[in-house]
Image (cartoon, rainbow, N blue to C red):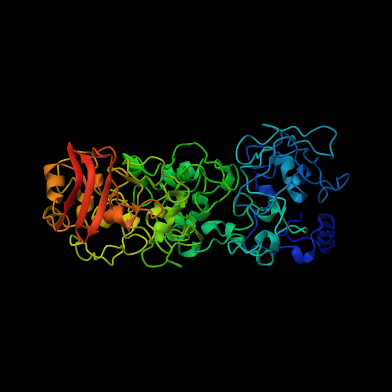
Amino acid sequence: MINRFVPVHASVLALAIAVSGILPAQVPPPVQQAAQRVRDSVHNLSVTGPGAIRAATETEICIFCHTPHGSSTDGPLWNRSIPAGPYQIYKSSSLKAKPGQPTGSSKLCLSCHDGTIALGSVLSRASPIVMAGPDRIPAGHSNLGTDLTDDHPISFAYSSSTVGSSTELVPAEAIIPPVHLDPNGEVQCISCHEPHDNSFGMFLLRPDDQSALCRSCHRPDSWDSSIHATSGAVLSATAAGLLGAPTVAVSQNACKDCHRAHGSPGRPWLLARENISRTCDACHDGTVAQRNIRSELQKVSTHGVAIDATPIPDSSGTPYVEGTRVSCSDCHDPHGAGSSEGLVAGVPASLARVPGVGLNGSPKESLSSVEELCFRCHGDAYATTVVPVNRQIVQLNVRLQFQTGNPSYHPVANPGVNSQVPSLIAPWTTGSRIGCQDCHDADDTRRLGGTGPAGPHGSIYPPLLARRYDTTDFSVESTSAYDLCYRCHQRSSILGNRSFKEHEKHIVGERTPCSVCHDPHGIYSGQGTARNNSNLINFDRAVVFPNSLGRLEFIDTGTFRGTCNLHCHGEDHINLTYSP
């Protein structure tokens, strides 16, 4: 390849172009900065080279790559053998292109950078040039080896079919110079690197502050207004060390906060650490990001996010779960988080660009409400396999529990069906809707006056509840024991028996928890009826049993009226009726 930074005679330029196969129109424009010549860079492997790797006595500089006579046809006056390979190729479910074995100029780069051919082994010498130190690039990011699964993919066609309908990839004709494709329209090492000039470090074609290099081809939706693109928080020394990134502002590092183009520990997505959540954890431990998510994930009840070193297997990218383990990206899109673009009322900016599943079970590209995110895992995917209460009617699909045709449900997806709820505390009314996050949240969430992060990352109250909710039989009633319920339902109304004349007797006298009779999510119409399961009635089978006649049922006989057939706390209820 020609050195476009150093003026050359026109005839030499024409020869170089002819040999390399680069057409004049495809030579990227020069970068407007003084070039660092090869002799001053670590690509000078002669005895005069500035790097730790150099020859013992050889004074020629270009000879390690080029020779005027006896060169191969693999590259411009090429003086090295082509590595044999084969190579392990980068793979990811998010990659539309299909890279094969390295081709074109990338093979020339790999003749040194895969470590299989000695640096001093050149075609123009009968014996290898003797090196003062190691004769191959030492282990590290510069020595790619033959396993390229942890490196940015190369040698693939970047075309309209590659980009497809994606708005997150720059069309081939609009790639921002000096980043460029090779004459065959393929991405190669030289698409990002200029081996003859190290002005920007790592022989990059352009400076990479705020990921200008990456964004020559990549343009994630909502990135410009996202928190990771705008945050002025500076990486701590610890976070920078874990991520292999400079100790500068998050926005300045941009892509480098989370990704490594070479030697990535998290291979499928070129992550800076072994898995998605571990990468997030480097900053979201309270030392860089404002809120400490790590401490939330160490509480009694958590979302089970894996921040250990185990890689999360790549997946098929279903609308329900992104992998076989829970990760931060199942709920957050790191490229769009914090952006308000396209958000609807009630959906926090931290959930920007996150897909969901509608109440009808259909995938959605963006959220209309928070529960659509929850339905991705807690709906048809049946992420919940252990129910905290052994219900008479068991339903693991939470999406079904909130269907509008159900006999009763908490008003999450739509207002409830009960028009008589005298215990509601203003501003709640029977026409109100609540969200999953009104019950499931951090116990110290700032939404309820705490100082912790909002969202169900972790809580001291299982299962991921924002407030205490005792479900153990014989619990002593108090404002704290049922704090979750009393946030919306007035305690004096409940214990004043305004909707059920024996509330106080059961809750205070018999010490029966709310959960023994009421299922807080709802009862699916395919399993329950308005006659037996109004008012969220769905008994806890660990406490409530069939009566002596073998019957276990509640019968709704009108507003605040009903009949019970059951056995509970030693009492046999046979057609026991109650009314206001």
Residue occupying the point 65% across, 40% down: 144
Can residue 79 be seen?
yes
Q: Quadrant of the N terminus?
A: bottom right
Q: Is residue 171 left or right of residue 77?
A: left
Residue occupying the point 52% across, 48% down: 322
Can residue 249 be seen?
no
Answer above or below: position of 212 versus 274.
below
Between 543 and 181, the one lying in front of the other is 543
Answer above or below: position of 546 versus 207.
above
Q: Quadrant of the C terminus?
A: bottom left
Q: Is residue 242 left or right of residue 416?
A: right
Residue occupying the point 78% across, 36% down: 121
- Residue at the front extreme? 549
Q: How many marks?
A: 0
Between 299 and 533, the one lying in front of the other is 533
Place of residue 467 in the rendered image (x, y in percent of width and height, measured from the top left): 24, 49
Q: Is residue 276 left or right of residue 261?
A: left
Place of residue 565 in the rendered image (x, y in percent of width and height, measured from the top left): 23, 45
Between 179 and 65, the one lying in front of the other is 179
Q: Is residue 154 left or right of residue 104?
A: left
Place of residue 454 in the rendered image (x, y in percent of width and height, measured from the top left): 32, 54
Place of residue 208 in the rendered image (x, y in percent of width and height, measured from the top left): 56, 56
Between 222 and 529, the one lying in front of the other is 529
